Amino acid sequence: MRAERARSGLSADKVARKIGVHVNSVRAWERGDADPSGHNLVALSALYGCSPEYLLDLSDDRRGHANFAKKDNDE
């Protein structure tokens, strides 16, 4: 998330104001100490111009297309 914020040229404080959260929340998300709620994740992805999956590191593609590993329950 920090890389996307840097790419956008925004400070953590400005991101927090734009999506309506406290700057400490943005910092915690960027450190990996907490995860944003679904609503905040969508707001961040819209702000940064990438998919929620990309922000959560579930995809290498900024547009999304998550690659979830499927478990075989028969094992």
Image (spheres, grey):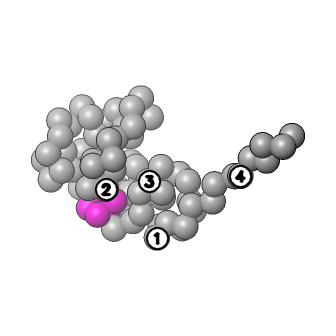
Q: Which residues are magenta?
A: 44-48
Give residue 71's position: percent from left, percent from top: 74, 47
Q: Secondary structure at mark 4?
A: loop
> Which of labels 2 and 3 is toward the front?
2
Name the amino acid, label 2: Val
Position above or below: 61 against 12: below
Residue 75 appears in the figure: yes
Q: Residue at x 55, y 54 (%)?
A: 58
Is residue 65 within the magenta segment? no
Q: Earlier in the sequence, mark 2 or mark 3?
A: 2
Count how many numbered circles sit on residues in the image: 4
Determine the CA span between mark 2 and mark 1.
13 Å
Q: Earlier in the sequence, mark 3 or mark 1?
A: 3
Residue marked by disc 2:
42
Determine the CA span between mark 2 and mark 3.
10 Å
Determine the CA span between mark 1 and mark 4.
21 Å
> Which of labels 4 and 2 is toward the front?
4
Q: Secondary structure at mark 1?
A: loop
Q: Magenta stretch: dominant SS?
A: helix
Residue marked by disc 3:
55
Left or right of 11 on screen, residue 58? right
Quadrant where the C terminus sits is: top right
Residue marked by disc 4:
70
> Which of labels 1 and 4 is toward the front?
4
Determine the CA span between mark 4 and mark 3.
21 Å
